[in-house]
Image: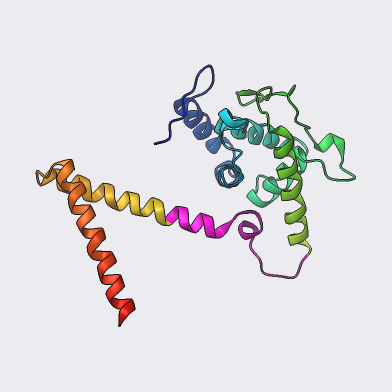
């Protein structure tokens, strides 16, 4: 069981409301925010209590970037926003300083759309900058290549993503079965016992097929 307690910070209610507001304001916010959350989770940079960022800081960074990007004449298009986002928070060689917002432990970002983030407690801020630099490098390389590789496969561990999806679907199916059992008057211990029996039968059937 994993629990994320917000003490002196932002909780799920804060972040959900803020994200909904930004999704209405910016067309590309939802798509880019989702990709960034998956990316930081795969790199173990998603949890504030282990020196990572957390959802709130990702939303504030993206909101800040969108404000700056659009003010400079950029388009609210997911592909353009993602590439320029990596550029803004990375440290690529020959970078244009006015297009960047370097992050360190003294940074405090504030957005016109509301929301601010203090990066003083982000112990792994250097790793985040390196991730942005690598993200920008990979996408830039992809833009100039003649291959058909997708943007997602160049940034994310797709096999891990597939396994997580299968796990989530299995949990959802189990939950639906439990709700159905409750309606039939079956207790939780009985439900767990039935689940164990079903798993044993499934394993036995699988072994039987392999031995044929």
64 left or right, relative to 46: right
Q: Residue furthest bottom?
A: 212
The colour scheme used here is rainbow
> Residue 119 lies in magenta, yes or no?
no
In the picture, residue 113 is in which quadrant?
A: top right
Q: Residue at x 14, y 46 (%)?
A: 190
Q: Residue at x 62, y 60 (%)?
A: 153
Residues 60 and 155: in front is: 155
36 left or right, relative to 189: right
| As drawn, 40 above or below 153 | above
Q: Residue furthest right?
A: 94
Q: Residue furthest left?
A: 185
> Residue 150 lies in magenta, yes or no?
yes
The picture places residue 95, in percent across and down from the top left corner, at: 87, 42
What stretch of residues is rendered in magenta?
145-165
Residue 74 appears anywhere in the view:
no
Residues 161 and 140: in front is: 161
113 left or right, relative to 136: left
The N terminus: image quadrant: top left
The picture places residue 2, in percent across and down from the top left corner, at: 43, 35
Main secondary structure along the magenta-highlighted residues: helix
Q: Residue furthest front?
A: 211
Residue 96 appears anywhere in the view:
yes
In the picture, residue 198 is in which quadrant?
A: bottom left
Q: Residue at x 40, y 53 (%)?
A: 167
The C terminus: image quadrant: bottom left
The picture places residue 24, in percent across and down from the top left corner, at: 53, 37
Q: Residue at x 30, y 71 (%)?
A: 206
């Amino acid at each position: 069981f994993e629990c994320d307690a917000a003490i002196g910070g932002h909780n799920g209610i804060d972040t959900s409301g803020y994200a909904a507001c930004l999704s209405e304001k910016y067309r590309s916010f939802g798509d880019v925010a989702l990709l960034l959350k998956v990316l930081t989770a795969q790199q173990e940079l998603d949890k504030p209590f282990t020196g990572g960022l957390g959802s709130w800081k990702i939303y504030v960074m993206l909101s800040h970037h969108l404000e700056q990007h659009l003010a400079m004449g950029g388009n609210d298009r997911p592909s353009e926003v993602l590439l320029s986002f990596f550029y803004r928070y990375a440290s690529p060689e020959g970078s244009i300083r006015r297009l960047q917002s370097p992050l360190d432990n003294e940074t405090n970002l504030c957005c016109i759309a509301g929301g601010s983030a203090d990066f003083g407690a982000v112990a792994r801020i250097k790793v985040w900058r390196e991730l942005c630099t690598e993200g920008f490098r990979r996408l830039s390389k992809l833009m100039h290549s003649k291959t058909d590789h997708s943007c997602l496969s160049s940034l994310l561990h797709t096999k891990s993503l597939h396994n997580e999806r299968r796990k989530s679907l299995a949990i959802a199916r189990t939950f639906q079965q439990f709700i159905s059992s409750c309606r039939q008057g079956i207790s939780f211990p009985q439900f767990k016992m039935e689940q164990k029996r079903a798993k044993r039968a499934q394993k036995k059937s699988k072994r039987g097929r392999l031995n044929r």
